[in-house]
Structures are given as C-alpha cells and as structure tokens.
Amino acid sequence: FIQYTREDHPLRIVVTDTLEVGRHGGGFCETRAAWLQARLAEAPDRPTLLVLHHPPIDHGITWMSVGEGEAWARRLREVVERHPQIVALICGHVHRQIVAPFAHTTVRVCSSVQPQVVLDLKTMDLETPDDRPMIVAGPPAFALHRWTGNGLVSHYSDVEEQERMKILARYTPKMQKFM
C-alpha cells in the first residue's frame, strides 16, 4: 500500500490507499483500516485532511459509484466516525466535481486533467449496453483547498477558465468606495 502522512502543514494530511488490484471501485481492507486508525490516533486534536482515490459514496453515476453499502466504504466510515479531527476527505477517480456528506464531514471530489466522466444520473443496466456517452474530452480541471484555521474552503476551476472569462469589473479607486 502507498500510505503516508504529511505533518509539515497547518492541516495534517493523511493519504490512504484505496486501490484494490483487479477491482474498479476501490477497496479498504482491515490492514488499511488498522493503519489509518493508528495514524489518526497519533494526533486526535490536529485538524486532518484524509486523501484517497476512490470516493466512498453513492454519487449517482451508476458505473462509477461504489455505494456506501459496500464493505470497504462501511469500514472506512467506521474509522472516520471515530475521529472528529477529520475536516474532509478529498478524492478523485470520478473526474467530476462532487461534494457530499460522509460520516461527520464531507467528501470532495475533483475533476481531472484527464477526460471527464459524463454527468448522467439515469440508472444504468451494467449488463445491457445502451450506447450512452460515458467519457468526454473536457478542459483539464483542478481543485485548490485552503485551510482557514477553522475550516477547509475548496475552489474548483478548469485551466482554461481565466482565458475565456469576460472581465465585468476591476478593482479601481472608483470601486474601492463600494468595498
């Protein structure tokens, strides 16, 4: 497993491996749960950001959603619920911007610099292909997470956003009197 902590920031960062070889939806076995439990117990009063690849939630995109009912997601929830110092979980895998509740905190999923998963919340029969689009070429995207000292603020953007924006106002002496 590739798992580690970063202690050199105001917000403690704990990276937990959710890769399960041969499985698309991720995993979180007892060994990883024990490792995470031990790392979180080391700093119970330190705000902590938990980083993992697979979001442990049912986000509605059938072919990418693992669902909270799966054993690995339940196991992760049990660990997270015991540690109120976790301020958020940040994930990838789905290549879409998603924010959802999980245990006492939130899961925040970021888009990707790679192709994007289509936002399609219709039920999908995984045994019967229906020719629906699944992945599109969208602009590369990223998230910027900022720790304020008492909360995590997440900004989502794509790399082309600044180039295509039409400026509607600038900060000038005239604007200053409205601030």
Image (cartoon, rainbow, N blue to C red):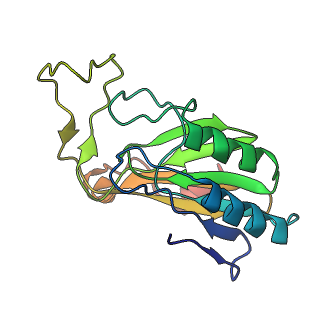
Q: Is residue 153 above or below residue 81?
A: below
Question: How many tags in the picture?
Answer: 0
Residue beneath the point at 29% across and 59% down: 113
Residue beneath the point at 14% across and 19% down: 130
Work out whether residue 41 or residue 122 is closer to the camera in this orientation and state it: 41
Q: Quadrant of residue 147?
A: bottom right
Would you say residue 67 is visible in this rendering? yes
Would you say residue 43 is visible in this rendering? no
Q: Position of residue 32 (x, y in %)?
A: 61, 61
Residue beneath the point at 63% across and 61% down: 31
Work out whether residue 93 or residue 179 is closer to the camera in this orientation and state it: 93
- On screen, residue 68 versus residue 163, left or right, reads right
Q: Is residue 97 above or below residue 34?
A: above
Q: Position of residue 103 (x, y in %)?
A: 72, 39
Residue beneath the point at 73% across and 63% down: 48
Work out whether residue 138 or residue 174 is closer to the camera in this orientation and state it: 138
The residue most toward the front is: 30
Q: Position of residue 129 (x, y in %)?
A: 15, 22
Q: Quadrant of residue 127?
A: top left
The residue most toward the right is: 45
The residue most toward the left is: 131
Q: Position of residue 94 (x, y in %)?
A: 38, 44
